[in-house]
Amino acid sequence: MRLFLDTANIEHIRHGVRLGVISGVTTNPTIVSREGKVDYQKLVQEICSIVPGPVSTEVLSQDVAGMITEAREIARWAENIVVKIPASLDGVEATSVLAKENIKVNFTLCFSLNQAILGAAAGATFVSPFVGRLDDVGEDGIRVVADIVEYLEYYQLPTQVIAASIRHPQHCLAAAKVGAHIATVPYNVLLQMIQHPLTDTGIKRFLDDWKRTQQT
Ligand code: E4P
């Protein structure tokens, strides 16, 4: 499973890329708003120049014509741009048009297999089931990821699943186990993934033992 960072924070993205484990970034209007009042295009272009892979940027329009116009404009910002289109009926139509123009679409705000079926049929490059938000309303977010992965594999469709709305390392683990192609993780989850108390005590014990032998 590949890892994307779910942030627009430049320092966090630089760190993730430096670690060599981050191959893409996803943003949304909420994520960008956390960076304060910024020049949206400039920020996205900077992210695109740092990240060695797809950078998802969301449209704000909700109607077909508006989404298509915005997406065409966003797609010009950088080579590795992916346009996020919401899983609405207008979003399906916009995705179909954009996919035919070879504009990569991340079919976002996806909460069901039926929505993913339509996104894939429309030609979306990625579909993003929102695991945490499904769990929040008492549904099983990972079950939805698993169903979408199984569906795409059964029909050998090229659309890739990005497990999104990841809240903790357990979500990441579960997404990997059900075969999600990608998990987009917040920076704090990326840092938590490497943590294990036995690693810390193990390192300390090795160093203590080594120092003791040097003293005798
Ligand atoms: C990524 O593509 C999504 O926009 C993001 O993961 C949503 O996360 P949230 O549900 O924590 O806001």
Image (cartoon, rainbow, N blue to C red):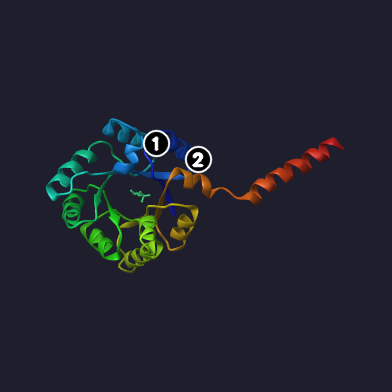
Quarter residue 6 falls in: top left
Q: Nearer the viewer, residue 148 or 39?
A: 39
Mark 1 — residue? 9
Mark linked to residue 78: none
Helix, strand or loop at label 2? It is helix
Q: Nearer the viewer, mark 1 or mark 2?
A: 1
Q: Residue at x 18, y 55 (%)?
A: 96
Quarter residue 17 falls in: top left
Q: Is residue 158 above or below residue 196?
A: below
Q: Amino acid at mark 1?
A: Asn
- On the rendered image, what quadrant is the C terminus found in? top right
Question: In the rendered structure, which disc, 1 or 2, sits on the residue that comes first in sequence?
Answer: 1
Of all residues shown, which one is farthest toward the front? 137
Q: Amino acid at mark 2?
A: Leu
Q: Is residue 168 above or below residue 207?
A: below
Residue 27 in picture, x, y percent from top left: 33, 43
| 18 with respect to 35 (left or right) | right
Q: Residue at x 28, y 39 (%)?
A: 79
Helix, strand or loop at label 1? It is loop
Mark linked to residue 19: 2
Of all residues shown, which one is farthest toward the left? 65
Residue 101 in picture, x, y percent from top left: 18, 48
- On the rendered image, what quadrant is the N terminus found in? bottom left
Of all residues shown, which one is farthest toward the bottom? 154
Q: Residues within 10 Å of mark 1 (few under 14, many from 20)?
A: some
Q: Nearer the viewer, residue 19 or 157?
A: 19
